[in-house]
Image (cartoon, grey):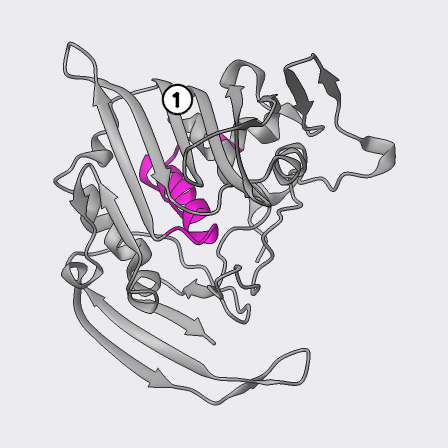
Amino acid sequence: MESPEDEGLVAMTDSAAPITTDTPDTKTVSVMVQADHLERLSSARDPLIAIAELVWNGLDADAESVSVEFAENGLGGLETITIIDDGHGLPYGDGLNAFRNLGGSLKLPGHRSARGRFQHGQLGKGRFRAFGLGSHVRWESTYRDGATVLSYSITGNRENLGSFVFTSPQPTLQTPGMRVTIENLRANFRSLDLSVAPAALARIFALYLQQYPNVRLRYAGTLVDPVSAVDRMVDLPLEPATGDDGRTITVTLTVIEWQMRLLSKVRVDWVPGRIVELGPHLQSKRS
């Protein structure tokens, strides 16, 4: 379903190509989309949702470990937020395409990752959510290119939304993965407090973490345990569905009663292979 904030997403064509400028060591790409639309995407109505979008990016890259870390300044306030994953990283060419195209995500709903996991991300909006947390965001991607491991960075600033500076890929001894660092934070964000955030993340990722039990999500060093957020869970088999390709799709409705009340918007999105949120107490998974 298309939400109001999806309005204005543009598909890149030859007649409306993003601006690209180069130097010997960097490349700058710009997204051609209305500035007020980017501003809406980067407004953090719920800081935890912005972090969850970045966590999803790591999971969609087949990460087995995703960690959300915080650094404080001398006054005890938040200095940086860092999301680290051990996924396959974002190859340089894919990064250029992904960051210059809004509304044309490389991850299509219902598709599976290289390791066979259902993918969550779409429309390429997640990266702009990070600017709702802080004005300066840096992505550091490490990936395999044949027998070589390469690393490069992408930098963006809220003052110039839609313009991203890429460094050139360089050989590295690091292992593949992604590190996203958010600086110049806009607030301390009480909703990110350790006393409430892990349980909230457990509700967001409960079905995914149970479907892929080898995945570990840590928040400020605390392991996010989906079981701790669930009071009761019941799987209800539904009538099989038929996909566009004619194959039979097994459908299971998972009814979840949370330990704490979950306040969220109701969203129904019947896409084969996606974990779908139906409301505060209902989620569905299709396979």
The residue under label 1 is which amino acid type? Gly
Q: Nearer the viewer, residue 238 or 97?
A: 97
Could you classify mark 1 by the number of other residues whose Cα lies within 10 Å: few (under 14), some (14-19), or many (20 or more)?
many
Q: Say which quarter of the image contains residue 10.
A: top right
Magenta stretch holds residue 43: yes
Where does label 1 land, which residue?
134
Instruction: From the image, give the main secondary structure of the stretch colored magenta.
Output: helix
Residue extending farthest front? 147
Is there any visible trace of residue 46 in the rendered image? no
* Image spot of residue 23 (x, y percent): 70, 12
**Measured along the vertical axis of the image, is residue 152 above or below residue 52?**
above
What residue is at 37 percent from the left and 42 percent from the top?
85
Q: Say which quarter of the image contains residue 45.
A: top left
* Image spot of residue 37 (x, y percent): 60, 31
Q: Say which quarter of the image contains residue 49.
A: top left
Q: Nearer the viewer, residue 2 or 12?
A: 12
Q: Is residue 217 left or right of residue 29?
A: left
What residue is at 62 percent from the left and 85 percent from the top?
247
**Measured along the vertical axis of the image, is residue 173 above or below residue 20?**
below
Q: Is residue 80 left or right of residue 149?
A: left
Q: Which residues are magenta?
A: 41-63
Q: SS class of the residue under badge 1?
A: strand
Q: Is residue 156 left or right of residue 134?
A: right
**Measured along the vertical axis of the image, is residue 279 above or below residue 54?**
below
* Image spot of residue 42 (x, y percent): 48, 30
Residue extending farthest bottom? 239
Is there any visible trace of residue 60 in the rendered image? yes
What residue is at 32 percent from the left and 75 percent from the top?
254
